[in-house]
Image (cartoon, rainbow, N blue to C red):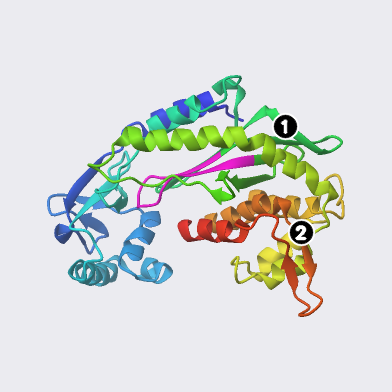
Amino acid sequence: MQNLMQLTETVKETYGSLPSYEVSSETISLTDTGCLDTGKNQFPVLFESQDQLADKTHIPKHFFQELPPNLQAVLFNWRWQRAISDGVIPRHMRVNLNAANQVIGFDDPRLLRISLVKLMEVIRLSLPKELSPEQVSVARFDSTPQRLWISCFSPDKRGQPRAGDIINGGVDVVHYLSGNKGTQISCYLRRLQCANGAVVHVCRDDHPLRARRLLNGRFDEADMLGQIHRLLSEAWTQLPEKMRAIEELRDKDRMPIEYLRQQRTRFSLNERMLTAIERAINQDELGPTGKQWDIFNALSRVATHDESLTFRQRRTLSRMAGEFSQQTAHRCAQCGQWVREQDDAHTDDSVLQEQDQSE
């Protein structure tokens, strides 16, 4: 397992200098061979990046990816020019490339773009004074052409829900290399026994705090990095509170699986995911407790170890594990439905807001 200092060096080597070009939107087109034409240059488009082309022109992603390049070009170019005429696409776009000069996506040049090297430096600088980057372990470093997902923790930040069962705390960062989404920062909770991971919003007055993409001209990169630094520092500060809540799960009645089934549409849970969660309740290495701890562990277990899930599904389950960590539910005597007790009134909306921002 890498430490934070080693990961920082890896990011410098891999993402140290990624080119991008600001071009007129009207000059952008897709060629019959699958290249993006900017009017002056043509760049190959990565298969993974076709999602963003489809999304910008409101074409179903799976349908678009199955088309041959010549038909993709006809459909994309018509929809792209239509979107420009309708004012949906800004007058200029920033085309983002990887080190091999392949298109990884594009975004609005009116929004600030953050250097990955500087982002890693901010993550390092946000550590509590008692921690060094060498003391922080990286539990997850997941990358795609458009996104990095980093989860790191300190063995010194720990709680113990039951004897011998250790929870470590840290921070979780999702950063987009392309597109208009902001950097997502959360508290990270990792179970030592099985490496299950969950994320919890950084909050103030029961409201989740977020990093926003700021406008060029009115702000600069230092403003964006300062915003992220404050959120990361707050995440480390809130960890003891989050871990105390996890320890209290051993004394809370277990939320029934029927509640999750009842809310399956709200949280985009399909039958396979629900079955995996129900099965995971009985897969605890130390045995189920019959308490809310079982739900936390089952959700985080599936989110961490089920590689067949999409990024969005794993983030949803990881977020649910964290945000439901203080929740119980009871059956309503009048309607017979399961009702979540409002220990934390923003929980459901927090999970849904995360879904709206995820892929």
Q: Where is 211 relative to 239, above or below?
A: below
Apparent side of residue 144 relative to residue 221 in the rendered image (left or right): right
Q: Residues within 10 Å of mark 1 (few under 14, many from 20)?
A: many
Q: Which residue is mark 2?
A: 328
Q: Where is 151 relative to 307, above or below?
A: above
Residue 208, x across and y down, in percent: 54, 49
Q: Which residue is mark 1?
A: 158
- Write the residue at 61% across / 19% down: 130
Contact between marks 2 and 1 (CB within 8 A): the answer is no
- Write the residue at 30% across / 54% down: 45
Asked whether residue 152 appears in the rendered view, the answer is no
Q: Secondary structure at mark 2?
A: loop
Q: Secondary structure at mark 1?
A: strand
Q: Is residue 183 magenta?
A: yes
Label 2 or label 1, whichever comes before in sequence order: 1
What range is drawn magenta here? 172-188
Location of the N terminus (image quadrant): top right
